[in-house]
């Protein structure tokens, strides 16, 4: 049985809950997470300064690794949100997404499940996370949901989805908070969703490939500047469109959620810093409470251990 955990809001106050193969009472008898962990996670999740939230969470990671495993089951701490008390209908249609059992990015939030977590947090929908290993991603059960053996996937009742853009679009269509009500503004927001994934992200992914997988090739030094120029060509146009506005088209939308997520991949390259308005745009996205909760949820699983 896969262990599950998350953050639930009771009376407007967040608290951490843990579920696993055994009941909470039995878990306490066998060595559940220490009481202090809930307080640490709660403080982090209600801190709207991302850097401060990460600093608060980091010490908790060691506690999780040292104390959260016990005979008969294991607990993994995930911080997500359950807003309000779900109705019987909602409870029967639990949303489940998949994420890396251990993300290759070490908790930087670049794995695409973070985008789905963020969307779920923005629309206030409770969800559960099923962690999968690289081997499990290629197993028949997972391939039945995602034919290409990747994450994330989305399951709700009889509905199964894959592809991050599709999942975010579905959530935006079904719940208020990510698409405008006005018909034209809604269409423009959807256009920016496509622009983020189809126009801006491809050269950024090409840059990642060039640096990580092709860096040792004899032609790498000649190719890398060309790839960076292709990224800058996209950012030049995006920066010009954004100007001094907070968001791409009026209020925050699913288009901004995906665009910020895409631009975050550039942080380590230094290219984003060349565009002051885009760097500020990304910072605004990261400062949203929903993003902070989503980031903290994946960070609790993927953060590198501290010795």
Image (cartoon, rainbow, N blue to C red):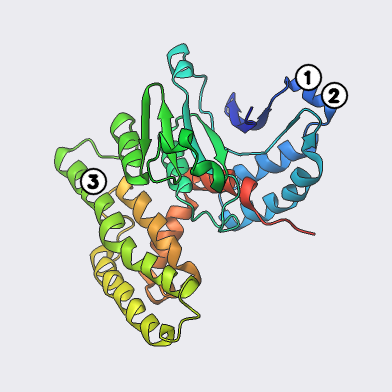
Q: Position of residue 14 (x, y in %)?
A: 61, 32
Q: Quadrant of the N terminus?
A: top right
Is residue 13 shown left or right of residue 72?
left
Looking at the image, tell me whether mark 3 or mark 1 is earlier in sequence order: 1
Can residue 253 be seen by looking at this rendering?
A: no
Question: Of the numbered discs in the image, which one, if any, rests on residue 190?
Answer: 3
Question: Closer to the camera, 182 or 145?
Answer: 145
The answer to whether 176 is drawn above or below residue 254 in the figure is above
Q: Position of residue 9 (x, y in %)?
A: 58, 28
Q: Distance between the residues labelled 3 and 1?
A: 47 Å
Residue on which the image places disc 1: 25
CB under 8 Å between callouts 2 and 1?
A: yes
Q: How crowded is mark 2: few (under 14 residues within 10 Å), some or many (20 or more)?
A: few
Residue on which the image places disc 2: 29
The answer to whether 232 is drawn above or below residue 129 in the figure is below
Q: Residues within 10 Å of mark 1 (few under 14, many from 20)?
A: few
């Amino acid at each position: 049985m896969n262990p599950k955990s998350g953050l639930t809001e009771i009376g407007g106050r967040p608290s951490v809950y843990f579920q696993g193969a055994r009941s909470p009472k039995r878990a306490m008898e066998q060595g559940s997470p220490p009481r202090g962990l809930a307080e640490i996670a709660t403080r982090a999740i209600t801190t709207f300064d991302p850097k401060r939230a990460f600093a608060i969470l980091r010490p908790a990671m060691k506690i999780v690794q040292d104390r959260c495993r016990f005979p008969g089951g294991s607990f993994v701490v995930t911080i997500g949100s359950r807003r309000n008390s779900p109705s019987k209908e909602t409870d029967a249609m639990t949303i489940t997404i998949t994420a890396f059992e251990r993300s290759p990015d070490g908790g930087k939030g670049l794995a695409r499940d973070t985008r789905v977590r963020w969307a779920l947090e923005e629309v206030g929908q409770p969800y559960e996370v099923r962690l999968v290993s690289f081997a499990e991603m290629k197993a028949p059960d997972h391939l039945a949901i995602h034919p290409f053996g990747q994450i994330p996937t989305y399951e709700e009742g009889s509905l199964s989805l894959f592809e991050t853009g599709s999942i975010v679009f579905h959530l935006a269509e079904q719940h208020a908070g990510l698409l405008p009500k006005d018909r034209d503004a809604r269409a423009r927001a959807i256009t920016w969703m496509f622009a983020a994934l189809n126009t801006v992200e491809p050269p950024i992914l090409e840059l990642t490939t060039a640096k990580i997988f092709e860096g040792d090739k004899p032609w790498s030094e000649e190719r890398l500047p060309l790839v960076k120029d292709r990224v800058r060509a996209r950012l030049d146009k995006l920066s010009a469109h954004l100007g001094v506005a907070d968001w791409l088209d009026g209020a925050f939308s699913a288009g901004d959620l995906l665009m910020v997520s895409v631009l975050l991949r550039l942080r380590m390259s230094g290219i984003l810093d060349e565009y002051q308005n885009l760097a500020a745009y990304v910072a605004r996205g990261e400062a949203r409470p929903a993003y902070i909760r989503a980031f903290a949820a994946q960070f609790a699983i993927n953060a590198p251990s501290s010795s």
